[in-house]
Image (cartoon, rainbow, N blue to C red):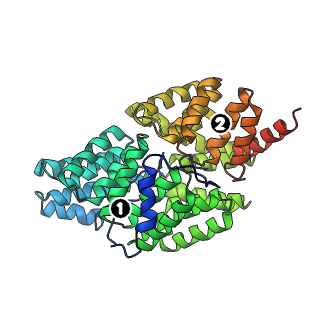
Amino acid sequence: MHPDYTAPASKPPPPARGGGRLRTIAITLGLGATMFAVGAVMLTPGGTTSSPPSAHGQPVGAPRGSIEALQARVTRLPKDPGGWAALGMAYVQQARTTADPATYDRAEKALRTSLSVQRDDNTDAEIGMGALAAARHDFPAALRWARKATSSSPYSSSAYGVLADAYTQLGRYDEADEAVQKMTDLRPDAASLARASYAFELRGDTGQARALMRRSLAAAATPADMAFAHNVLAALDLQDAAPRAALAETQAGLRATPDDSALLETRARAHQALGDTTKAIADYRAAIAIAPLAHHLLGLGELQQSLGRPDQAEENYALLRAQDRIREAAGDPADTDAILFEADHGNPRRAVTMAEQTLRTRPFVAVHDAYAWALHRAGRDAEALIQADKALAPGTRSALFRYHRAAVHHALGDREAARRDLTEALREPAFHPLHADAARALLQRIDNTP
């Protein structure tokens, strides 16, 4: 259901110009990869965000030790640039898991302190600043910092991870592929394999994506790394309409990290696909208690709405509106969840404005899709089709993207194109608590129309 996840393809499209080089990753890498603690952030493609989360984000170069231990270290050694950089990265990771934007300010302060102690060739702080910019969805800044890091340390796998993330979210997929290839050449570990997995998934080759994520899981050095891999594999299972497999995958991850909000949310979607809405709601609530992220709130709200519980849904929607007011006051671009929420549950014209602002600095597939949906909801379907095509252009196999384009095609009078997209979308029957039923109803209307 998350807009930044992609669905499997029955037949992968031909790779784009950078895809041929990436294919060598799946063929040539052995499983005896060096394992190490990981930390710079790979975003959920949308990642929202993710996601972007999953975004689809695998940390690279995470600092060892707790925040308290790192704070004690910089108190004891205030002129240690590595200590300040590690503390800054720890704050970035904390902010991403707690959804507390104030923690980003603490991260920036620590990272800039590191840079003030050592301005030149401070790769750790440059990586940290790139990860921080990416977490804030300032991808042009993330790209600038990643380039600094790869220049100061051309053999840093972590630096190329941040570079790959920035290029991906900026829609420069071939350059992202090259950065992933370089990262994997330097160190074929859990983080680089995860990025390679996503590169294939983005192009619709979910078979390679799954195989590489399995190898990332095998190379995982920490419970958090294992949880990440289990979560991505479960999401792929859901897109394959295999909710029982997804449930087993999330259970495996939660045994090691029972408080992982991403795994709880994915397990909620697995329960939902299996028809157990009571357990789905419980898992959503558990995820929100840990991290009240927009896609958790939206997922629960739309599930409650689908069950005829508008008052309960509205409680989550009110929190989403409050979060968006904070974002707007800060002048930050909207994430795709906020755009889709506004399009479906608010003012579509405002959603269009939000999407246009975001697209200026983040021309990523999920943003093109959210923009397309906002334009459709605002009655601007000819423009919406251009954006919907861009969302699916790399080969991305997202049921939600397909449904959005189907609705646009139908509004423009192209029933055959709408039927094709609806058929593809419904290969994942439970892709969305509200739109899956709408997709079935629309396909039935098309089939019954002479």
Q: As displayed, is residue 440 above or below residue 153? A: above
Identify residue type, mark 1: Thr
Query: Is residue 150 shown above or below 384?
Result: below
Residue 220 picture location, percent across and down: 41, 71
Residue 142 falls in image quadrant: top left
Q: What element carries label 2?
A: helix
Residue occupying the point 43% across, 56% down = 22
Mark 1 Cα shell of 10 Å, populated few (<14), some (14-19), many (≥20): many
Q: Is mark 1 on a helix, strand or loop?
A: helix
Q: Can residue 159 be seen in this view?
A: yes
Q: In which quarter of the image is the C terminus?
A: top right
Horizontal side, residue 174 vs residue 203: left or right: left
Q: What residue type is labelled 2?
A: Arg
Image position of 351 with respect to 121: above or below? above
Label 1 or label 2, whichever comes before in sequence order: 1
Report the disc number at residue 405: 2
Rendering quarter of residue 311:
top right
Asked if residue 157 lies left or right of residue 199, the reply is: left
Q: At which x and y percent is residue 177? A: 40, 51
Q: Nearer the viewer, residue 142 or 391?
A: 391
Q: Which residue lies furthest to the bottom in this view?
A: 32
Residue 297: x and y in percent read 57, 48
Pinpoint residue 207: horizontal percent, then vertical percent.
Answer: 57, 61
Instruction: Determine the CA span between mark 1 and mark 2.
Output: 35 Å
Rendered image: mark on residue 184: 1
